[in-house]
Image: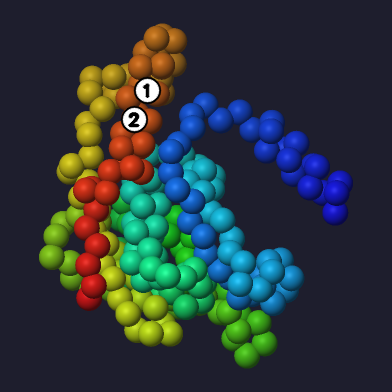
Amino acid sequence: MTSNSTATDTTQTRTNWQVDYDADPIEIRDPVAEALGVLEPGEPFVVTYRDAVKEAGHSCPTASGAYRIVQLGLDALYPDDYPVRSEIEVQTAGPQEDAAYGVMSRIISYVTGATGDDGFSGLAGGYGGRRDLLCFDGFDPDTADPTFRFRRTDTDETVEVAYHVSDVPSGGPAIGNLQRILDGSASDQQREAFADAWHRRVQAVLRDATLFSVEGV
């Protein structure tokens, strides 16, 4: 066990992250992980925004918005306890092929475990199964903003979370340096200015609760 832990720590140390994010982690239980001895019974996985970035392959207001959507939704559904994978159904207000809903649903699925018909069906008898808990175009929202619903299958409680993307800070003119970065013509100063502006937008999404609304359904 010691050698495996050491190897993992070394790998994480080698990862050259260029930015640090101020975001609370999400803690969530997984009955299958508990049954198979990955976690102690009752103890949660700890999922960070960095984990979400690894899943998406990038960090942007869409990815950070998805992280906050699922975080706020789970906090509302489980105010006094850990959320539980296999007991969380997710509905989106848009289609899977939509650029925003597609990226967001991948991150939300990563956190909650909720999947479509290709997901984990559970241990013997379906224990801990997460298949068919993610549904696209599941409802008609009252807003054009990206909107998701989270339902506890054990209590049937449901909350709806909307992300007010039009209120996200613009980032200013430095965002325009992206095209120069992509075509290789950007100076070091332009790269730094873009990165600073871009990640300030991401951080704003991670910390500004007014960019989201949460209500019971």
196 relative position to 113: left or right: left
List the residue tagged with mark 1: 196
Q: Residue at x 22, y 58 (%)?
A: 213
Picture coordinates of residue 57 (x, y %)? Answer: 50, 42
Q: Residue at x 85, y 49 (%)?
A: 2
Disc tally is 2
Q: Is residue 178 above or below residue 148?
A: above
SS state under label 1: helix
Question: In the rendered image, which quarter contains the C terminus?
Answer: bottom left
**Farthest residue, direction bottom:** 125
Q: Where does residue 155 sit, x and y in percent of width and height? A: 38, 85
- Vertical comparison of 15 with 120: above or below: above
The correct choice, above or below, for 153 with respect to 14 in the image is below
Residue nearest the viewer, comparing 88 with 58: 88
Label annotation for residue 200: 2
The residue closer to the viewer here, 183 or 102, is 102
